[in-house]
Image: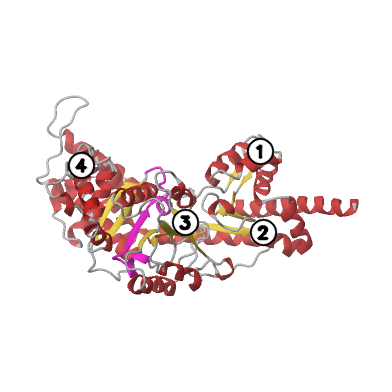
Amino acid sequence: MDYKELKSYMELSPFEVQFALTNIAGNFRDRTLLNAGRGNPNWIATTPRQAFFTLGNFAMEETKCNCKYVHTGFHAEKEGISERFQDYAKKNPDAPGIKFLKSSVDYGINKMGFDPDSWVYELVIGCIGDFYPEPDRMLPHAEKVVHSFLIEFLCKNQLKSCKYDLFATEGGTGGIIYVFNSLIENKLIKKGDKIAIGSPIFTPYLEIPHLNDYDLVEVEIKADPDDDWQYPDSEIDKLKDPSIKAFFVVNPGNPQARAIRDETIQRIANIVKNDNPNLIIISDDVYATFVEDFSSIMSEIPSNTICVYSFSKHMGCTGWRLGVVALYEDNAIDKMLSSLPEKIKNQLIKRYESISLDPSKIKFIDRMVADSRSVALKHTAGLSLPQQTQMTLFSLFFIIEDDINYIEGTKNALNKRIHVLYKSLGLPLDYDTTATNYYAVIDLLKLATDRYGMLFAEWMEKSYNALSFVFALADKESIVILPGAGFDAPSWSVRVSLANLRYEAYEEIGNKMLETLETAFEDYSMTLNKK
């Protein structure tokens, strides 16, 4: 690939680059493609899926019990449905996932105090998907279950008395877009406003503010690669500026795969309390469950934080598109809405008057639901019921004891893979309690310096770039990794996803990275010899 063509790829999102790299790397019959580009895990949680499908079989029996027409059923009857489910479970002890499904039903009844028929009925109609979502924001039992999951696994059970409103969305990315759109629609953020972005970061957070829809001014809060990718106090203190309206952050990070330290979160909390009380924090916590005793920003600053979580990564369900937005009931965002100038309030009343007798009192999270369907189509808003039902079962899989081997197994797999990769590269790896090990960020210049000296690294920096390295790796070795610069990581870094492949592949990836570096060193040596 010539320099002009390579340069054109530098303007693309790393995920678009990934598609190009995959096409190149997969174009060889005599080589196996090793794609460590995107973060789609190669594991799946089987038990809660089996439970979902077995629930579907029970649900179908319920719809057919009073119907004599072929291929046809009627809505399930609510009265007595819990007892009928218990009878079904007894008669089908070997059905896939039935033990977990029964445990889930029993947990809802005995631990969460659900009315048995109401609980099982919601699961049944949810699995079938024969009604519109009602309430549109989230089904009532599903919301309570997912709420319990978030409190236990994202907040270390610190906020058991706190209540969050939840909005089930089409994955975490759906949640992110809904948050952005509603902040703009409700004039809480306006074109030209300053927003802070914790970097490195998931690429869309870098790209969205520049779109014409938003046209925001970015203030970078840069993590320090020499301090395990933590944010220095001097960077966090930028948030004291009251002209900064919002702080967007992925925690634990992507690509740096580190959770923010508790003391840093406390520092942000103090800034919100003393310096910038209207700071809106949007925290994408998708990797939270890979960190032991993780503490979300929303657990320390509930009033100002909009938390977005997705089940995609830990449950291996990227295709299900299961996400949720959490917003504290007594939140600062709703107070900001009530403090808007009268002119803007009247504009918003007009926007939402078709869906409420008192549109001025609609909470921000409910405005998100309406905005997700351009207000006029709010009656068809909401995540599909089958998706919400599977999300509920995934949450219960975390909560009840059946999950422990699965959760620890995924963590152990990532830990093994990153150790294999680092060992093959000849790099040290210290234990870090904040690390998810979901991604590895490798500094190619440091690797080059360690192996061949500073003069070679300086030559390589002048002669090539990280993008040329990843394209060479794809073309010569059929290995796909992504340039770190697309995530606002250092320009000569690369991101290796540790979720995609079995551990043996990471030894090969490390070895091939070194061979590609060796090829560059040979070019360097030839250049010296010519001189």
Which numbered disc, 1 or 3, marks the residue that appears first in the sequence? 1
* Mark 3 crowd level (few <14, some 14–19, many ≥20, 10 Å Cα): some
For discs 2 and 3, the disc positioned in front in the rendered view: 3
The image quarter containing residue 514 is: bottom right
Q: For the residues marked 2 and 3, what is the alpha-carbon distance in whole angstroms?
A: 38 Å
> In terms of secondary structure, where does tag 2 sit?
helix
Q: Which residues are magenta?
A: 296-320
Is residue 400 visible in this depiction of the protein?
A: no
Residue 218's label in the rendered image is 3
Q: Is residue 57 left or right of residue 423?
A: left
Q: Secondary structure at mark 3?
A: strand
Which image quarter: residue 275?
Answer: bottom left
Estimate the spatial distance between the alpha carbons at disc 3 and disc 4, rounded to whole Å.
45 Å
Residue 424 — which label? Answer: 2
Q: Which residue is mark 4?
A: 125
* Residue 443 rendering spot, x and y as whole percentages: 64, 60
Find out whether the residues at labels 3 and 4 contact each other: C-beta distance under 8 Å. Answer: no
Q: Is tag 3's residue or tag 4's residue first in the polypeptide sequence?
A: 4
Q: Residue at x 47, y 56 (%)?
A: 218
Q: Secondary structure at mark 4?
A: helix
**What is the crowding at mark 2: few (fewer than 14 residues within 10 Å), some, or many (at least 20)?**
some
